[in-house]
Amino acid sequence: MTPTNPFTLEHELLRQSFRQFIEKEITPNIEHWESNKICDRTVFQKMGEHGFLGVGFPEAYGGSGMDMWSAVVITEELAYANVGGLSLSLYAHTYLALPAINALGTEEQKQQYLVPALKGEKIAALGITEPGAGSDVGGITTRAEDKGDHFIVNGSKMFITNGTLADVIILAVRTGEDHNLSLLLFDTKTPGFSAIAVHNKLGMHSSDTAQLFFENCVVPKSALLGKQGHGFYYIMSNFQEERLIACVTGTAGADLAVQKAKTYMKEREAFGQPIAKFQALRHKLAKMVVNVEACRSMAYRAVAEYIEKGPEAYRIISMAKVFVGEEAFNIINESLQIHGGWGYMEDYGIARLLRDFRLLNVGAGTTEVMLEIISKVELDEVSHKKQIKARI
Ligand SMILES: Cc1cc2nc3c(=O)[nH]c(=O)nc-3n(C[C@H](O)[C@H](O)[C@H](O)COP(=O)(O)OP(=O)(O)OC[C@H]3O[C@@H](n4cnc5c(N)ncnc54)[C@H](O)[C@@H]3O)c2cc1C
């Protein structure tokens, strides 16, 4: 580990063993999952058996106990394998849903959900977005009516990753007016619940995206995650890890696009010479390399600050999310250009990268929302930090 290389020998060993796992268990299946528009449950089980889902989680619950850099290793390797859809499903489980159970769950809740989820026996999802409210988390309308010892949940959620596969959903519900939201550990066997797959996506084809419906679902009070009414602040805090993962995956995806461009430039000939001899393309490639390094510096700095400060690192995380989201997509787009007509085909994997990575500017907080957070900090209007501090 050095200031420019945060990885230890332990991280590198994890990287090697995960690469072997990808080659054996993921790469041979990916085309099948992409065309089926969903991955298999078995991939979660296999990831769990090998300990790859528990990376960064406490050993007491079946995790590896390793640090956040180990999660970076897993994330990077999935991006280098060009399996965006599957990665999204795995992230939704491991880095969107499970951190909330780990941070807020009671011992009983952790035994019931976190332990089997880290083994890949139960699949988790995070349900915040609704048909009428995405960026505006405070505008969600799915309501949990307090009936004393239980809640009655009614409403609907949209674009939920792992929506049809999930056994448990960290569900954001309204329990009062304004920002009075709560999180529930919602068991998908609850009567009144249904999920419909959303298949008409631009990319991320091997991930399961769904619309969820809740009709008079009876949920026991014991399913409350954290304190009632504090859900908004929990959600804001949980977003930071999700955004970091997006920055790391975006950087590795852009790096993959550069590697593909380099190989192609040496192989492909035009006008009697390799296209690598054309200065216009050489300079394009050089700029792509510079921008990948800039993305990596920002993403790694955001991870380092998160390790030090937790959710309070939101300023650099928001900045990295904007920068990497835009640059990674531009780099992948330039790589497609270097591949010419073949880049537009499925053969070189660039088309899939472009489709999948377009989500970076939309998911986990849009670019505009990130810019809004940054401008609030810069103009001293921020209340977010105080809210997080006060409520967690
Ligand atoms: C493939 C996929 C998987 C997803 N998985 C999940 C999941 O697992 N769980 C989950 O809860 N959600 C999930 N989402 C939802 C995703 O997080 C939302 O789509 C995203 O937060 C944006 O919300 P929205 O779609 O409602 O857009 P809107 O919020 O309606 O935004 C529309 C436009 O308005 C802009 N805008 C909104 N507010 C502001 C503002 N204050 N200032 C400036 N501009 C603004 C936005 O930037 C955007 O350009 C997923 C989405 C996709 C596409």
Image (cartoon, helix red, strand yellow):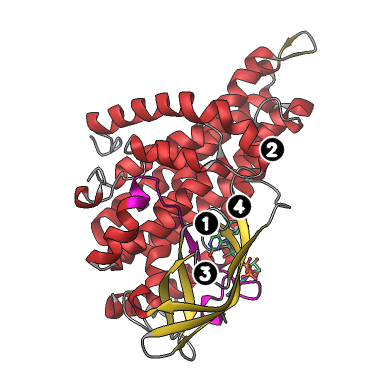
Q: Is mark 4 within 8 Å of ligand 1?
A: yes
For mark 1, give the secondary structure: helix
Picture layout, residue 354 above or below residue 379 = above
| Tag 1–tag 3 contact (CB < 8 Å) | no
Q: Which residue is mark 4?
A: 359
**Nearer-N-terminus badge (1/3):** 3
CB within 8 Å, label 4 to label 2: no
The amino acid marked with disc number 1 is Val
Circle 2: residue type: Ser
Residue 305 seen in the figure: no
**Is 63 left or right of 134, judged from the image as shown?**
left
- Residue 375, label in figure: none
Query: Which residue type carries mark 3?
Result: Ile
Structural distance between the alpha carbons of marks 1 and 2 = 31 Å
Write down the residue under mark 1: 322
Magenta residues span 116-140
Q: Which residue is mark 2?
A: 35
Query: Regarding ligand 1, which quadrant of the image does it lie in?
Result: bottom right
Cα gap from disc 4 to disc 1, whole angstroms: 12 Å
**Few, some or many residues within 10 Å of mark 4 (<14, 14–19, 20+):** some
